[in-house]
Amino acid sequence: MRVSEMRLLDIINIEDGRRLGPIIDLDLDLEKGIVKGIIVLTSSRGKGFFSSKNGDIFVPWEKVIKIGVDVILVDGRELFNSNY
């Protein structure tokens, strides 16, 4: 799957079934060649326990449960404030 295709998928929190928003960026470690996480633009723009002051959520790659045809499921129970 390409990043451009991933940006079209809905990000769903499995904890409450809520749609978090679209992927706006990937956090990559180019030296190690790994994806560290995804950055999601929230519709609440800065409200909630895991969004930063500019409304973006950092979802560590370990919290991505499943990438499907229509959605990406993430475990949002322990998401934290990020610097994004």
Image (tube, rainbow, N blue to C red):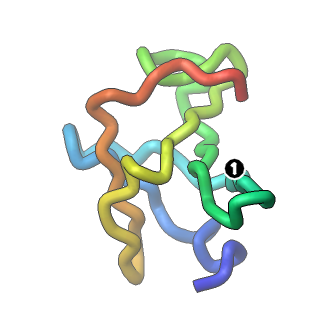
Return the x and y of residue 23 as percentages of the image width and height: 62, 55
Return the x and y of residue 45 as percentages of the image width and height: 62, 25
Q: Left or right of 14: which side holds 54?
A: right
Q: Left or right of 13: which side holds 25?
A: right
Return the x and y of residue 34 as percentages of the image width and height: 63, 62
Task: Please report the residue visible at 44 percent of the width from the left and 55 percent of the height from the top.
Answer: 11
Q: Quadrant of residue 56?
A: top right
| Quadrant showing the N terminus | bottom right
Return the x and y of residue 81 as percentages of the image width and height: 54, 19
Number of residue marks: 1
> Is 28 above or below relative to 49?
below
> Is 80 above or below relative to 28?
above
Q: Quadrant of residue 57?
A: top right
| Quadrant showing the C terminus | top right
Which residue ends up furthest to the right in the rendered image?
30
Task: Please report the residue visible at 63 percent of the width from the left and 66 percent of the height from the top.
Answer: 7
Question: Depth check: 11 or 2 in front?
Answer: 2
Q: Left or right of 53: which side holds 72?
A: left
Which residue ends up furthest to the front in the rendered image?
32
Q: Which residue is mark 1?
A: 27
> Is 84 above or below relative to 32?
above
Task: Please report the residue visible at 79 percent of the width from the left and 60 percent of the height from the top.
Answer: 30
Task: Please report the residue visible at 33 percent of the width from the left and 67 percent of the height from the top.
Answer: 66
Q: Left or right of 42: which side holds 78?
A: left
- Is label 1 in a helix, a strand or a loop? strand
Which kind of residue does numbered mark 1 sit on?
Asp
